[in-house]
Amino acid sequence: MRFLHSADWHLGRVYHGVSLLEDQDHALQQFVRIAADTRPDAVLLAGDIYDRSVPPAEALRLLDRVLEQLVLGLRIPVVMIAGNHDGPDRLAFGSGLLQRAGLLVRGPVEWAAAPLVLNDAHGEVEIHALPYAEPALVRSVSGDDTVTDHHAALAAQTAAVRAARAPGRRVVVVAHAFVQGGAESESERPLSVGGTGAVGAEVFAGFDYVALGHLHRAQQVGEARIQYAGSLLKYAFSEADQRKSVTLVELDGAGVCSVERIALTPRRDLRIVEGTLEAIVAAAASDPARDDYLLARLTDSGALLDAMGKLRTAYPNALAIERPVLTGDGPGRAHADHRRTRIQDLFASFHRDTTGLALEPAAQAALERIVDRIELEARSA
Amino acid sequence: MRFLHSADWHLGRVYHGVSLLEDQDHALQQFVRIAADTRPDAVLLAGDIYDRSVPPAEALRLLDRVLEQLVLGLRIPVVMIAGNHDGPDRLAFGSGLLQRAGLLVRGPVEWAAAPLVLNDAHGEVEIHALPYAEPALVRSVSGDDTVTDHHAALAAQTAAVRAARAPGRRVVVVAHAFVQGGAESESERPLSVGGTGAVGAEVFAGFDYVALGHLHRAQQVGEARIQYAGSLLKYAFSEADQRKSVTLVELDGAGVCSVERIALTPRRDLRIVEGTLEAIVAAAASDPARDDYLLARLTDSGALLDAMGKLRTAYPNALAIERPVLTGDGPGRAHADHRRTRIQDLFASFHRDTTGLALEPAAQAALERIVDRIELEARSA
């Protein structure tokens, strides 16, 4: 049996003020073509379909079109669960009716919901869809008071699957979780405040394939049968080195998986360039991908006037600039760090950048006194 | 052929700060029972399904449950269109898939969309679903530059239906519009700013039944074949005298309609009581419907302390109070009018209410001078 596994589409996502909907549309057109070429028995979508619980109408339209192409056009059943970004009720609207047409959606967590059962030459396969749910919700739905964290919540859900499964059938589980040992990316929203929300891989014992969503890097966790498909697009610059893909899974009669990643080509890549502003702008002339989403890491040490304006004459979709020299550290969050820098140090750095000279000790002392007085007045105001 | 026609459910509506979702649930349970008893060939829902374009998740859940009961439970096809309150894209999500399960939803306006075709002993019936759309949108979708108002917009849509209909078939149209001659209620949102948005009934020439939504009073417009089903509940006190119902339509082989209204019993009625506060509270003891939503029209002439608090000891779901004596007019908008009253007159009225005496001319003159000075200073500040 063959599955096409994907996750973390985050439809409607806005990054650095830019809507990625056209990029998502572009990648999903490839997804539909890959489905048409590989003819899977089912498509598995492991959550974070939308970027937020009330997505923009355009995101709904896009998902609607893709699901129609898969389910009505290609006649491939789709199993889709809510992730931590999705609104479970909104995602699951019409699910009873949609299931009759070949789309199994699980939004709110349900106890012992019936699996989708598919057949191949080797027998039957059960596909269990386990939507993301807060531990407190699983505790209340299951009536199991020991459910206090994500691990216990998913353990309870998968134990229910094991109890309900028919003997002899192969079992596939679709889930949205942070499984211990997985590598995080910057664009995931943590599942717990003040904790990892991590789940031990042992909760998936006995299942033949586990189609995961949540982590944005495609990866297997321990064994080949436990896979993250990764996100549809690069959703943060820290993912610039990742290659996004969909995961094609072959499950044989003995329940052994072989997994292939099929690359997606983005409409515009999201990448990082490094150098002086002048050098980057000059090199752009021979860059065939000037429409890409860019983070420019500028090595210039002096002041730069309207750096973003200049950068965008060469790269119209440049999204951000970093100045590692100014922040004194390498990669990271240049602009955010400005806010944590003392105003005295910011001024000294500005003075150095514009005049090329360090502040003299007397000037430095005067500056400290002035800032102290201003801050004192501000506090007592 | 038999239809059950309803409209203007406004799911998720909040009235005077109270969510009507439980009331809507109560009425819709009756709706489902009526459908089970009368076994229509189709249910026609003529728009304003939700009260706003992004309804609360609970409203989605309620609609989802009702549609499942109708379509999956009772196997009655449902035809549903967007009204002016609905978000067309959100309402129509999954429509391609849902149609295969027996639910035809039209959100965005489409040109020459295929009708639902049903059969009875007399032949075929085409049901055309025409969602509400702004004239500018119809102009752009149809390419017809003469579409500048609602009349022209619906005329263009119905002309397209006439052009596409198969000869010999009876034709039913579901639409959401203000048809000229219809009686308005207070709880409808006008379709045009600064105009009625009215449509002449002649746009429906040649159709055997026209299932309308928008006006909240159940009514026929001219002929029996053009009907508003009215809203699910009373959505304003000005509708207190209305009896809400669903409309059962029998369409015979010759295309002649007979129409029956089947009453809905609200969970709590919405009504107006009149009298002194004391008399109303006293009479409540023998009132079997003290949970009703109440507007109390108080005839007391003097000042009342915490009138709402006292009223709610007798009627816990009282929503509003009117004091016709204070505003000097009968039914209407007591509180709104306070804001339009000059502060001098408000004070004089307060003085009269509390002391029983009119302001003396000297006091009145002093008051005028004081208010003038305050207003002058406020303007120059």
Image (cartoon, coloured by chain):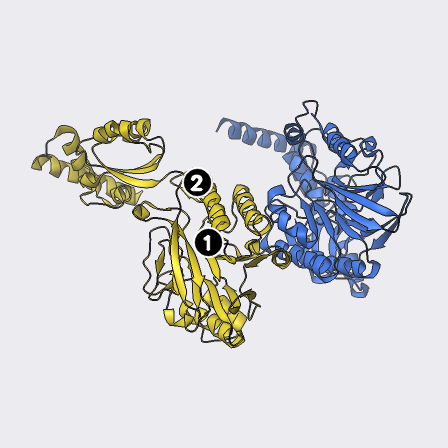
Chain colours: A blue, B yellow
* Residue A339 x/y as whole percent: 65, 37
**Residue, disc 1:** B48
Name the one closer to the observer, B246 or B64: B246
A232 left or right, relative to B235: right
Residue occupying the point 43% across, 65% down: B209
Mark 1 or 2, nearer chain start? 2
Q: Label 1 neighbourhood size at 10 Å, few (<14), some (14-19), many (20+)?
A: many
Q: Chain of mark 2?
A: B
Report the amino acid beneath label 1. Asp
Residue B185: tell me if it is visible: yes
Instruction: Determine whether A295 is above or below B289 in the image.
Output: below
* Image-quadrant location for residue A140: top right
**Residue, disc 2:** B23
Residue sticking out furthest to the top: A146
A286 left or right, relative to B258: right
* Residue B90 x/y as whole percent: 56, 53
Q: Chain of mark 1?
A: B
Name the one closer to the observer, A285 or B260: B260
Residue B52: tell me if it is visible: no
